[in-house]
Image (cartoon, grey):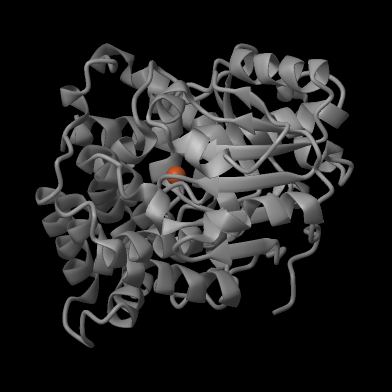
Amino acid sequence: MIPPSGSSLGSSAELSGSSSQAHVSPDGLVAGTHALFTFPNRVIFGNGARASLAAELNRLRITRPLIVTDAGLVASGLVAEVTASIKPAVLFQGVQGNPTEADVLTGLEQYNTNRCDGLIGLGGGSSVDAAKAIRLLVTHPGRLADYDYTQGGLDRITSNLPPLLAVPTTAGTGSEAGRGTLIQLPQTGRKTIALSPHLLPSTAICDPELTLELPAVMTAGTGMDALSHCVESFLATTFHPICDGIAVEGLRYVFKGLETAVREGTNLEARSAMMAGALLGGISFHKGLGVVHSLSHALGSEGRVHHGTLNAILLPHALRFNREVAEFRLSELSTRVGLGRGGDGAGHLITLIELVLARLPLPRRLGALDALRRDSIAEYARLAMLDHCHRTNPRPCTQTDMEILLERAW
Ligand SMILES: [Fe+2]
């Protein structure tokens, strides 16, 4: 593929598809923009993989790690179990869902006060993202807003970072394999992303057994985040053969495991499928996401609404919105995950996702979420327009489109 003039790998243009949507071929092969895929980091996957934590710390020459996690996970005993063999370590348990800059700065202070020399992000996406943000500020001056991806922050993030181990205890965000960290910032008033290949965790330890105790509602919400990553990244206007193949495989795993993992939390096969789907989803969206994530980032800036739950509500509406321009890709994805050839492939895929949603213990309307206000739709839409994800949505989005989508989902 001949790149368009003016774009370059590794620049902040890498995920921008908005200027080139006229060049996109129906199959996505001629996408007009670059997608950058930078891998591998070390990924240790399997039941009991947590036993490799001490050896990985040794390999990374971490002698005093800061464990970044949340209070609930500490109270459950899981943090103690996973980190029992690590001494000395410093525990920071102040991460909240949708973490804020204040959380990050508190963790940073603990890191510096205790002279830590590396980090372990242990928990859901919030803990791993907070660990990434602390890691960034250990060696990079200024505030997190200085590294806002939408303001050219990519070019200001260097490889001079302390090592980071990511140990997910949910199967959803894929942050263990992602380059970004999303933090709610006072300067921007929204969830703001810092993104760089350098922010990839040094090692990801994916142990499905760590998700066995996850409640059904969280399993469903985080699982729908993984599903959204696979679908949105496959439909993104950028084309990358590695990411696209990974998105398909990730979606196959999610379809295989999601309902069973929700219904039967101790089913290790289903938990393994979901951890695989989440990991692959996190890799696939190196090429970009779409309007679902712009809207859920905007809505997640309000209160403590769960990211994956928002995605679950928004996804069917976004797919119908995108279908007008993404019929071929939706049909292709449908075929590749085994929904058969010919006929109404796009419709079959959307219907299957809606059938799965109907069987999950999740709200189906934004209006069911107390933290959200319908009279703020215009403001949510404004924040969504500022988010980077919709730049690679197959159908360009305006403020009015965002408002209409929110109304339909309310
Ligand atoms: Fe997500």
Relative depth, front residue between 373 and 243: 243
Whether residue 44 is visible, yes or no, is: yes
Whether residue 397 is visible, yes or no, is: no
Q: Quadrant of the C terminus?
A: top left
Residue found at x 26% / y 82%: 338
310 displayed left or right of 168 = left
Picture layout, residue 249 above or below residue 222: below
Relative depth, front residue between 103 and 26: 103
Relative depth, front residue between 250 and 209: 209
Q: Quadrant of the N terminus?
A: bottom right
Picture quadrant of ligand 1: top left
Picture layout, residue 38 above or below residue 142: below
177 displayed left or right of 163 = left
Instruction: State the residue lying farthest toward the bottom.
Output: 341
Residue found at x 81% / y 60%: 8
293 displayed left or right of 287 = left
Q: Quadrant of residue 311?
A: top left
Residue 248 x %, y %: 41, 73
Relative depth, front residue between 395 and 248: 248
